[in-house]
């Protein structure tokens, strides 16, 4: 009886170690569903200038904030705050290229608290200042 049980355990272990399919009850997709992700991204993009709260974004996806953060990161490869900063940077770059607004006006339009905050984050993301980026983009 011991040998039979040992052989079954060994077989199960080999099957788990060398199989490329998980049993149906074990397989689990991590991350947000497409609908949850779409609702969260839309809420963040529409409210980029006012900085939506984590509770508000998680509520749009129908999850608790802690669970939402884990699932968002599994889906997008980054935390929600990082996604918001990246989205703000993309909007700031577009406004710097396409408008003559001042850097301070662009900072407020993109949801930064002040011009220096945008300049600091902009430098971290792009390695340059907003004014230098604007000059390079227009030349």
Image (cartoon, rainbow, N blue to C red):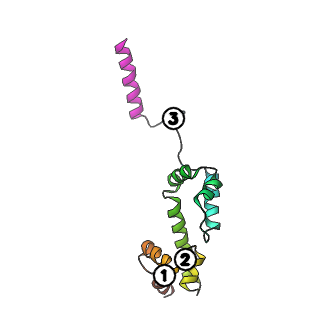
The answer to which of marks 3 and 2 sits earlier in the sequence is 3
N-term mark: 2 or 1: 2
Q: Tell me which segment is drawn in magenta.
A: 1-19
Q: From where the camera sits, is residue 97 visible?
A: no
Tell me if label 3 and label 1 are in contact, CB under 8 Å. no
User: Looking at the picture, how far across and down is residue 53, in whole percent?
Assistant: 59, 61
On screen, residue 3 above or below 109: above
Q: Quadrant of residue 46?
A: bottom right
The answer to if 129 sits in the magenta stretch is no
Residue at position x 45%, y 76% from top? 120
Whole-angstrom CA distance, mark 3 to mark 2, is 44 Å
Q: Nearer the viewer, residue 135 or 80?
A: 80
Q: Is residue 121 left or right of residue 87?
A: left
Residue at (52% x, 62% y) in the render: 81
* Residue wearing tag 1: 130
Along the viewing direction, whichever of 71 and 10 lies nearer the viewer: 71
Numbered disc total: 3
Magenta-span inclusion, residue 9: yes
The front one of 43 and 99 is: 43
How crowded pointer 2 is (Cα within 10 Å; few <14, some 14-19, many 20+) is rated as many
Residue identifier under label 2: 92
Q: Is residue 77 above or below residue 25?
A: below
């Amino acid at each position: 009886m011991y040998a039979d049980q040992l052989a079954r355990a060994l077989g199960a272990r080999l099957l788990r170690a060398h199989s490329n399919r998980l049993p149906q009850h074990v397989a689990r997709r991590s991350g947000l569903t497409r609908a949850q992700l779409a609702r969260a991204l839309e809420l963040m993009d529409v409210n980029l200038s006012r900085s939506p709260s984590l509770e508000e974004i998680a509520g749009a996806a129908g999850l608790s904030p802690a669970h939402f953060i884990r699932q968002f990161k599994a889906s997008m490869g980054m935390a929600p705050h990082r996604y918001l900063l990246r989205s703000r940077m993309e909007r700031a770059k577009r406004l710097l290229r396409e408008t003559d607004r001042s850097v301070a006006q662009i900072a407020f339009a993109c949801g930064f608290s002040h011009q220096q905050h945008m300049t600091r984050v902009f430098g971290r993301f792009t390695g340059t200042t907003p004014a230098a980026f604007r000059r390079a983009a227009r030349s």
